Image: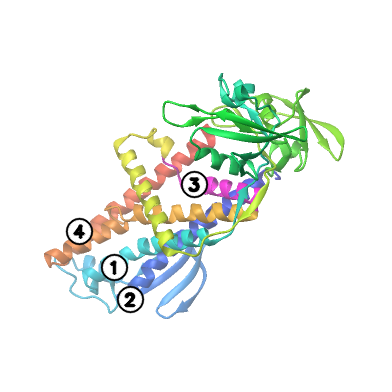
Amino acid sequence: MSALLPLGVKYLVGVVGISLVVLIHEAGHVIFATLSGIKVEVFSVGFGPRLFGFQLGATEVRLSLIPVGGYCRLKGSDDLDRAIRHKEKRPFHYVEDGSYFAAHPAKRILTYMGGGLLNFLFAVVLYALLAALPFPLLSTEAIVATTDSYPALFGENESPAARAGIQNGDRIIALSGTTAFDWEEVEALLSSSDGEEIFTIERNSRLYDIPVRAERLDDGNLRWGLTVVQQPQVGSVRLGSREERAGLLKGDCIIAVDTIPLANHLDLLTLLPTEAVAVTLTILRNGEERSITYTPEMDERGRASYQFSLEALLRKGSGASFSLAHGLRQSIRIGKLTFGSLGSLAKDQDAELHETVTGMAKSALLIGDIATLGFEQNPIGGMHALLYLMGIVSISLAIINLLPLPVFDGGQIIMALIEWISGKPINPKVYLILQVIGVVGIALFFFFLGFADVRYFFFKR
């Protein structure tokens, strides 16, 4: 039961996020239908049998049995039933007041565009808000090692920094006279360097100035041959993981792997087995040494997946001012990436389709997993991750629903557009046939997504 609880929490976070985005989409249809004079008979939170509800004007707002997503039902189903029963071959001869079929095609187009439009506006507001919120920034002490000391991690290479005289354990104080408070500032300064810097380092409580000339790579980037090191102190342990069940706790300092001592996190990364085999961690807790032996989980490729992270020192970053223009730019950028992903799928330029497309179950798990991991590290970081992913889902939902397929919003828009241009109402029988084709297509689509989920959970994990 304890192992299932964390998985349930991930699903809950992911499902709530996706459901909120779906409800916003449906709310967009409701808003624009109301503005267009089309009555909304039902706005449901969830699917399936009605549990309870209340009347809000002409609309019944209800909670349904399966509390995932939701839907809205526009007035007009009786008009379609009547037209089919009387075998009408031309336009709908009689429609009720407020019916979808009584509205001008332009109003129908606006109604079906409303869902995607509200999704996009929701993403714009989300990204404008995210830019304005304070956020955690990594602030790692600028204690360094040279990359040639860890060939297993960085490959066989000569380090320009080591050649100049920088040693493992040196602490960088400044670069060419500019003070660097942490490793992140060192990286920022090196990224804008011309390739030559004077490193002011602290070693054994003494300061040294060491000139270093970087190696310029073929792609124009600079290689200094430096990496940051940090103490291998546990920052978080995933709930329900094998590490947690073995007794690993936040704050434990790992001092050996399989009895081999280590000095920093690079030693830890080098010594941890890549295969899912038993490993013994020697830890220091409250000044007392302890040993923990367990077998780590296995990922999709059959390799060891360690469910703990090291302590990350953070400082508070201040957000910019609330800017809808920033939110709009970010939303457009993500929209372009979504279109590009759809294009890659269509051209088969990506991985195999069954590896690229995921169902709702896996999507909810991935969203919940990333968000809960963020919350475990830092509450503000977790909220940033969740809202950012919700923005991506919102934009993706808007784009996918506008595809010109029956039952999708795009298909309804195309039918209304044809009716508007031709000046002739659509044949009720044709409309019904397209709806049936759409429903069958949607059913097959969700079956495919469900199969993708089953394949992932039962054959990949």
* Frontmost residue, 168 versus 354: 168
Are discs 4 and 2 less than 8 Å apart at CB?
no
Image point (54%, 38%), residue name: 190
Among numbered discs 4 and 1, the one appearing first in the sequence: 1
Write down the residue under mark 4. 430
* Frontmost residue, 10 versus 181: 181
Mark 4 lies on a secondary structure that is helix
Write down the residue under mark 3. 363
Q: Which span is picked out in magenta?
A: 357-378
Calculate the distance from the C-alpha at mark 4 to the C-alpha at mark 3: 35 Å
Q: Position of residue 143 (x, y in %)?
A: 68, 36
Q: Position of residue 327 (x, y in %)?
A: 43, 59
Name the residue type under label 2. Answer: Leu
Among numbered discs 1 and 2, the one appearing first in the sequence: 2
Give the class, few, some or many, for how many residues have Cα within 10 Å of label 1's Cα (few <14, many ≥20): some
Please indicate, yes or no, whether residue 66 appears anywhere in the rendered image.
Answer: no
Name the residue type under label 1. Answer: Leu
Write down the residue under mark 1. 110
Mark 3 lies on a secondary structure that is helix
Give the class, few, some or many, for how many residues have Cα within 10 Å of label 4's Cα (few <14, many ≥20): few
Please indicate, yes or no, whether residue 120 appears anywhere in the rendered image.
Answer: yes
Write down the residue under mark 2. 35
Question: To which quarter of the image does residue 141 belong?
Answer: top right
Name the residue type under label 3. Answer: Ser
Are discs 1 and 2 less than 8 Å apart at CB?
yes
Name the residue type under label 4. Answer: Val
Among numbered discs 4 and 2, the one appearing first in the sequence: 2
Mark 1 lies on a secondary structure that is helix
Q: Is residue 407 left or right of residue 225?
A: left
Q: Is residue 287 left or right of residue 246?
A: right
